Image: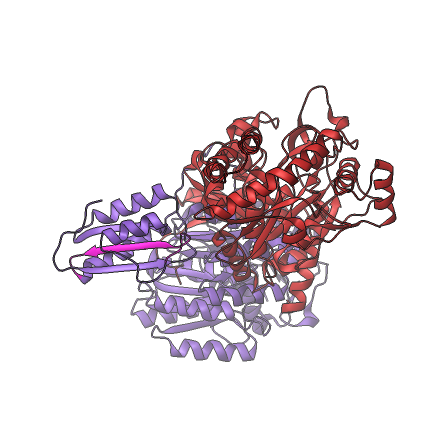
Amino acid sequence: MSAPAPGPGVRHVSLRGGVYADSVRLMQVSRDVGAREGVRAVLVAMATPLNVELATGMGLAPGEPASPEQLLVGITATDDDALAAAVAAVDTALAERERSRAAADAPPARTVGAALHDLDGASALAVVSVPGPYAALEAADAVAAGRSVLVFSDGVPVEQEVALKRAARQTGVLVMGPDCGTAIVSGVALGFANVVRPGPVGVVAASGTGAQQVSCLLDAAGVGVSHVLGVGGRDLSAAVGGLATLDALAALDADPATERVLVVSKPPAPSVAEAVARTAGSLATPVRSAVLGPGTPDLTAVVEALLADLGVAVPDWPSRPGRRGAPPGAVLKGYYSGGTLADEAMLLAAPVLGDVRSNTPLRPELDLGTDLSARGHVVVDFGDDALTVGRAHPMIDPTLRLEAIERLTASGEPAVLLLDVVLGHGADPDPAAALAPALVAAGLPAVVALVGTEADPQGWSRQADALAAAGAAVFASNAQATRHALDLLGAAR
Amino acid sequence: MNLLEGPPAVVAAGVDVFSAALRAQGAEVTDVDWRPPAFGDPADLAALALDPRRAAANRTAVERVLAAGSRLVDVRPAREALGLTDRTLLHSGPPLTWEAASGPMRGALVGACLFEGWASTVEEAEGLLASGAVALDPCHHHSAVGPMAGVTSPSMWTWCLEDPVNGGRAYCNLNEGLGKVLRMGAFGEEVLTRLAWMRDVLGPLLARAVRSMPEPLDVRAVLAQMLQMGDEGHNRNRAGSLMALRELSPALVALDAPSADVAAALRFIGGNEHFFLNLGMPTAKLAMDAARDVPGSTMVTVLSRNGTEFGVQTAGTGDRWFTGPAQTPVGLFLGDYGPEDANPDIGDSAIMETYGVGGFAMAAAPAIVRFVGGTVPDALATTERMYQLALAENPAMAIPVLGFRGAPTGIDVLAVARTGWLPQINTGMAGRVAGTGQVGAGLVQPPRECFEQALAALAQEARAATAV
């Protein structure tokens, strides 16, 4: 190390505790920082008597007594800017961990924490779909590492959800879920999500299939989404208090790619609705809400209103005509895989048909119990937790729904079938392959809400054509599909 | 929020359909090799994972460990250094009664009674110990550690180390060498003769030499150097012992003591490749004691065995011991000794693993792996596994073959439960019959019970403190 050139210059000398690096590493740091422009001399070394003497000889003597446990940083530079940059470069170099993993010998990470540690600084998030009792463990790893996490698992105790979301708020990250099935983050689809074109609308969703419906319609209208942030079905309950919804709103507000925000949910707890409305009103980004409840606009209507906000013409939502009319005395049989879509169908049907019974009823007295083949107007949500214990979600495994169609046909009850088929990542790679023959065999008039995009792996048109060939009427909008089914029933009465 | 700043890399734990979908999109995906936790009530595990104090508490605890220094400041008899009174013996591991003591522990306790002159025959010594006339107490209750039986009596000289950063002190007796030695349970004439020489000649020489050194020896720096030289600091201390010899020699020679005594001392130190172990252990003890009593921390502060039980303490539960039956090590045997001759696990020396070296730094010591019955890839894999149990990497303890990555430091009880991987300990093996001495060396793990109890206690404390 050369002695500093005489003449004016600026100096930094500091002693730091609690830092240790071996001498070779420190010599490397000294050399690298010393090579910077405007830096005349550098000594980064443990403050041993020898090194302090060396520093003194370089005109970098510490102004206080030094001990060998301390790290001595001494720099001379031509001006303040070069000096500040050099000090920052020392900090950066010391923070860098030397890594070269013997990859072949390294066991794979057993926890989210270990896997995030290995990624080492990359922009990352975690997706957790382990059994519910253990989901908080893995999610807490992500939060502790300062990473956002999507928790697909259900069966997570609500107090654990609250603890996770509180910790996330402190760390400045987002916990999506538990029981969150859908998110799109910067174009990366997590869980069940569609291939939606990039666009200006950010979606916050307490409902997975609701988010898929609105994002697919936005895609069909040529608008697209910036991000879709799921928050989990319980987020807007009084217990959770909308913690993730409020954080997601703030995140989208700060996101330059997001010009409009759309919140999709079932009716929140009143106290929470107020907090969300207050936050939404305070954002610079305009917020619209699709709250699925009695007397509120359906999801398609809210998307259409949003398109009007954006000055975009509402397109004819994609559809295919069906081939069958309803038999006399027909009833509505809604067999759904998406809970929010089932709710929307019931909300639209109830004013026309009267009571619709369900395993996820609008009112408790309409509960079907376990008898899913009850006669009369019925909407079944096959994705309900009670029906997915020990089996895959109906978006992946259609068995239960296909059995129900067979049983309905066998019962001879005249009916119009109303179904949803949800496309996208994670879903059945070719749902029409099993459903179309089942519809042909059933011989019943069928109406399908086909939620997806052309870019989805299954392809909206390909699936629509296959289902239409089986005689079904197909709609990209669940609201339109439901109204069409109601029209068929009306015509039959 | 950093969430929306460009396409993220994804870490996925659980069903593989989602990672497959992510890969199909061209996203960067890391799959977690997830499996249910090996033990622990799910509610307990969640209570700890969600304890809002935990992250900061563990950071505090492990930062104290990483910051701790270690200076050799003195050598004094245990009577003075530890205030050890007559008729009191310290031993390794968690608390122990004479009735429960194993062969080598009994042998060492008997030998210490003979050495102190409290008894003149083995039978008399056994009588004193059985009657409770000689009190037993763990080294760990006195800021001390001892390898194998760890038996420390008032007249034995102890290394006195100081942590200049956190201000703690730690103590350890002097290493006697290999073969038939007190710490392995031998108490024959040669053992007692050697202990007397250590008391009368070696101890005083070392005390004078250490006090005369211009700067106290930085023991942590020697430990760091050892890892660069093929030692792991528990079962292999060759380089460290030679460095200790190098550091002590000039001061010993300059004492103006009888040259025959100095020569004997130098020969003794140079001939004992575990001489440094008794300096490394209190160095680790200083660091781990600095992390004691951090509420909410799930970091292990003690791993220790008394030949009958294995004991664990954590930063979040103070001085409470969590114990289970000590396991018998697996490894290689000296001469014609075999597995049936080996005593269950014994010694405070697992403080090295608690500190992140020893078995945790196996990758640094390829020369040891065959002796403990492994291969070089095993050694690398062991250290890699231990990283997943550790809260931090210790930059002061760099492992050359891993690109100078710091040793995995600070065992997290929660990580042990989640991975089911128990801490890996390199250890010597004592003969199970009192008086035998060392029979081999190998690998051992703590019993899972210790961690099950620690987890339950930490969870209970977390619930009480946070009402989660």
Residue B409 position in % (x across, y down) = 53, 47
Which colour scheme appears in the figure?
A: by chain
Q: Specify whether residue A68 is painted magenta.
A: yes
Q: Over which residues does the magenta segment extend?
A: A66-79
Residue at the spot x=80%, y=42% of the render?
B101
How many numbered badges does the structure rendering display? 0
Q: Which of B185 and B367 is in front in this view?
A: B185
Q: Nearer the viewer, residue B80 or A299?
A: B80
Residue A406 position in % (x across, y down) = 65, 48
Q: In which quarter of the image is the N terminus of chain A?
A: top left
Residue at the spot x=71%, y=37% of the render?
B345
Whether residue B84 sits left or right of residue B243 in the image: it is right
Q: In which quarter of the image is the C terminus of chain A?
A: bottom right
Which quadrant of the structure image shows residue A349? bottom right
Q: Is residue B17 visible?
A: no
Vertical comparison of A338 with B94: above or below: below
Q: Is residue B374 visible?
A: yes
Q: Nearer the viewer, residue A394 or B442?
A: B442
Vertical comparison of A362 with A1: above or below: below
Residue B2 position in % (x across, y down) = 39, 60
Q: Specify whether residue A135 is painted magenta.
A: no
The chain displayed red equals B
Residue extending farthest left = A7
Q: Nearer the viewer, residue B314 or B264?
A: B264
The chain displayed purple equals A
